[in-house]
Image (tube, coloured by chain):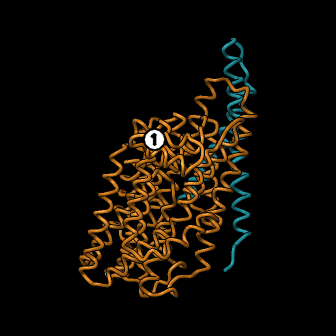
Chain colours: A cyan, B orange
């Protein structure tokens, strides 16, 4: 009987990193979007916040696409 | 079409029934948080999950051929053994559904295979070490890994996102939850539908209908995919309620953190060679996310009942399957008896479930017993004082289960309890 601690450890590390990174990116995207929306309501615009938000969502989308690729492959 | 005997036909149908129970048992994994936080309407959620399960079933056949490899020595596997294994797994899935507890369908299936193989070929047919490394360790590791990840993610998203406007937050977390739940559904379809394909293929090989090393025939892939999708669409509302409302109270932020953690763990584990159960990961993620909010609590009484169910999964399914295998030694009469027993038990469990219906209309109402303090005593009191609650149905189910097992030598039942405590 041999327990593959290495595999278990890497599953733990990768899942932890992926989860926290994705959730952080997504939340930052929401923060940016929220700033942008608040600014538009007051007649101004927050281009930087909006671009940042879109970048965050693009990264999250890329990660999800990679996830689907992993499922299919 | 291949030459299929009556027994083989029964095995295939039973395998599809297992696939169906697997579908509705595991809807909760993908959709419980989405439903309880209101991101999707219950019916929409299960429909989406069903479609993605079906799509997932067609995506790959890699898992299909590995289901029993390593765990049970394949030489001398008979269709009867597979049938016996499925009987145990189906009954365990139905009993846990009745009491509304999430438990691993894969563990039930492994338990069934182990029990049937031991009864058929003796203890030598099972690799004991593999049981520990493939079943016990993952059962402890999965909720821990997913729970810690979800806990940190929930904390982080509350901290980073406390200035997010209400509208953006509502829309955003809704979309995030739907996406991550979709990913879990897709992964479930690929993994679990393939297990059934693997079982049916194994039965066809064992029965001599197709050549060894053959790929699963197309009709096997199609029927397995459809069975799991139908099961998912039916929705295991009892389990969804426990996971979405019973374990803890979730807000959209937590639901998103939990589902993302579950998706990450499932994908990481299946790709890094340390397979973890979807159910265990999702339950752990929900609890972790529950603790990740300030003032968030996990109802440990419900969690404890769930852990006990996890510990019992393997021995209980093994015991039923072993008994079924022994009965079938009697020949055709035995096979008929087991079939009748299976159909009768399924019917009985369904009838008991009708006493207290849980469906898409009341899935988000918290079960009375779940809100109370500690487990067994409260549950028992609730069962006595309140007219048929979920708890009462649960107790009744437990009793029925005991009755079912009373027909079997009960020796293994006692050693099962310490295993549950682990």
User: Within 10 angstroms of label 1, few (less than 14), some, or many (20 or more) residues?
Assistant: many
In this picture, is B275 found above or below B68?
above
Instruction: Tell me which residue sits at (63%, 39%) in the image.
Output: B254
Q: Which part of the image, by quadrant, shows the N terminus of chain B?
A: bottom left
Chain under disc 1: B
In this picture, is B365 found above or below A43?
below
Tell me if I can see residue B156 in this picture. yes
Instruction: Tell me which residue sits at (28%, 79%) in the image.
Output: B334
Tell me if I can see residue B202 in this picture. no
Instruction: Tell me which residue sits at (40%, 54%) in the image.
Output: B396
Instruction: Tell me which residue sits at (41%, 68%) in the image.
Output: B197
Q: Which residue is mark 1?
A: B45
Residue B161, by quadrant, is top right
| Residue B139 image offset from top left, x and y in percent | 61, 63
| Residue B386 image offset from top left, x and y in percent | 43, 40
| Residue A20 image offset from top left, x and y in percent | 72, 46
């Amino acid at each position: 009987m041999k327990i593959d601690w290495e595999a278990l450890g890497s599953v733990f590390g990768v899942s932890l990193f992926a989860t926290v990174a994705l959730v952080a990116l997504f939340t930052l995207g929401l923060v940016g979007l929220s700033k942008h929306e608040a600014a538009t309501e007051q007649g101004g615009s927050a281009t930087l916040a909006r671009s940042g938000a879109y970048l965050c969502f693009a990264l999250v989308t890329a990660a999800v696409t990679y996830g689907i690729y992993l499922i299919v492959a | 079409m291949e030459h299929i005997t009556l027994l083989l036909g029964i095995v295939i149908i039973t395998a599809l029934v297992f696939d169906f129970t697997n579908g509705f048992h595991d809807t909760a994994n993908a959709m419980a948080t989405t439903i309880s936080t209101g991101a999707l309407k219950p019916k929409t959620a299960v429909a989406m999950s069903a479609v993605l399960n079906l799509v997932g079933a067609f995506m790959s056949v890699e898992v299909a051929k590995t289901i029993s490899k390593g765990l049970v020595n394949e030489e001398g596997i008979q269709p009867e053994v597979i049938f016996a294994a499925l009987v145990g797994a189906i009954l365990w899935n139905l009993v846990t559904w009745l009491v509304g507890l999430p438990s691993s369908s894969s563990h039930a299936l492994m338990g069934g295979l182990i029990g049937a193989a031991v009864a058929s070929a003796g203890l030598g047919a099972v690799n004991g070490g593999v049981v520990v490394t493939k079943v016990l360790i993952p059962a402890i590791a999965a909720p821990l890994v997913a729970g810690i990840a979800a806990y940190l993610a929930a904390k982080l998203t509350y901290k980073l996102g406390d200035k997010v406007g209400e509208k953006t937050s509502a829309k955003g977390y809704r979309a995030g939850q739907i996406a991550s739940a979709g990913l879990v559904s897709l992964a479930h379809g690929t993994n679990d539908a393939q297990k059934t394909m693997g079982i049916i293929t194994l039965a066809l090989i064992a029965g001599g209908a197709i050549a060894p090393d053959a790929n699963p025939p197309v009709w096997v892939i199609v029927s397995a995919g459809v069975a799991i999708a139908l099961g998912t669409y039916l929705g295991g509302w009892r389990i969804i309620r426990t996971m979405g409302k019973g374990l803890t109270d979730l807000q959209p932020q937590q639901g998103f953190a939990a589902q993302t953690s579950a998706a990450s763990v499932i994908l990481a584990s299946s790709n890094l060679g340390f397979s973890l159960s979807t159910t265990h990961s999702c339950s752990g993620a929900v609890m972790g996310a529950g603790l990740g909010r300030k003032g968030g609590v996990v109802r440990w009484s419900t969690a404890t009942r769930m852990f006990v169910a996890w510990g019992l999964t393997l021995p209980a399914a093994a015991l039923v399957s072993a008994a079924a295998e022994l009965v079938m030694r009697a020949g055709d009469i035995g096979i008929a008896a087991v079939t009748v027993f299976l159909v009768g038990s399924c019917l009985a469990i369904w009838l008991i479930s009708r006493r207290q219906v849980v469906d898409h209309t009341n899935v988000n109402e918290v079960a009375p017993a779940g809100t109370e303090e500690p487990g067994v005593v409260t549950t028992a009191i609730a069962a006595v004082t309140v007219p048929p609650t979920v708890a009462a149905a649960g107790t009744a189910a437990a009793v029925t289960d005991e009755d079912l097992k009373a027909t079997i030598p009960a020796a293994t039942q006692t050693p099962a309890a310490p295993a549950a405590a682990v």
